[in-house]
Image (cartoon, rainbow, N blue to C red):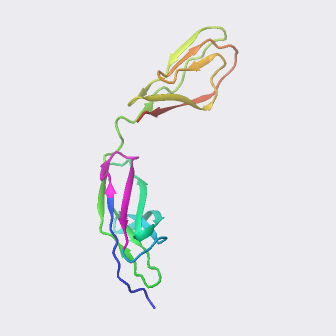
């Protein structure tokens, strides 16, 4: 016997306009539904709906799900769907539009791509460069040459190398909130 019970599902999005990469929170409730019901967040693509992420309801049919907003500027249409279950028919929410402002101009981009060689026993000083806002520098892979340190606030690599050879390392810049 096909599912027949009518139910409804609500949806809200917060925020509804943000830079790409922002986590958007979608929430709502599904009528006639307890906890554990699957809810799918869907994005409109042409004439089709694509599943983005799933969650399950909590007490009273409530749900909350997060999804990362595209970095491609534009307005995206979303809805939530509660699949048929037992005698409960599939339910779709109304749609909500979420606007991506594209890439945040304050997102840092490290612009230093290489560093000049240093010599054992000779003082070394180079400062890493980047665009965007404030934050901290760190080493994310490899290791600095012996005798060289990274100033996490300024990005300055300073010191006197104590050994010869080649060092390979990757720096990371993390913005402060």
The residue lying at 59 percent from left, 13 percent from top is: 159
Q: Is residue 142 left or right of residue 40?
A: right
Can you give x and y, in whole percent of width and height, for residue 84 in the image?
A: 44, 79
Q: Is residue 120 left or right of residue 50?
A: right
Q: How many marks?
A: 0
Residue bounds of the magenta highlight: 13-30
Can you give x and y, in whole percent of width and height, for residue 90 in the image?
A: 40, 78
Look at the magenta stretch and give its main secondary structure. strand
Q: Residue 1: within the magenta?
A: no
Of the 4 image quadrants, the one containing the C terminus is top left
The reply to whether residue 69 is visible in this rendering is: no
Can you give x and y, in whole percent of width and height, for residue 131 in the image?
A: 40, 29
Q: Is residue 124 above or below residue 79?
A: above
The residue lying at 36 percent from left, 49 percent from top is: 72
Name the foreground residue: 162 vs 35.
35
Q: Is residue 82 above or below residue 25?
A: below
């Amino acid at each position: 016997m096909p599912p027949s019970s009518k139910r409804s599902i609500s949806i809200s999005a917060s925020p509804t306009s943000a830079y790409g990469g922002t986590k958007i929170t979608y929430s709502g409730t599904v009528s006639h539904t307890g906890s554990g019901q699957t809810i799918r967040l869907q994005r409109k693509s042409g004439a089709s709906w694509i599943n983005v992420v799933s969650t399950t309801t909590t007490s009273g049919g409530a749900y909350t799900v997060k999804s990362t907003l595209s970095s491609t500027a534009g307005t995206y249409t979303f809805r939530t769907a509660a699949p048929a279950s037992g005698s409960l028919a599939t339910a779709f929410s109304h749609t909500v539009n979420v606007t991506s402002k594209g890439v945040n101009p304050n997102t840092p981009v490290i612009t230093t791509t290489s560093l000049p060689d240093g010599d054992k026993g000779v003082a070394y000083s180079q400062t890493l460069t980047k665009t965007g806002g404030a934050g901290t520098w760190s080493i994310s892979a490899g290791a600095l040459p012996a005798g060289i340190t990274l100033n996490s606030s300024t990005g300055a690599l300073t010191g006197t190398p104590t050994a010869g050879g080649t060092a390979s390392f990757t720096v990371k810049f993390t913005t402060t909130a």
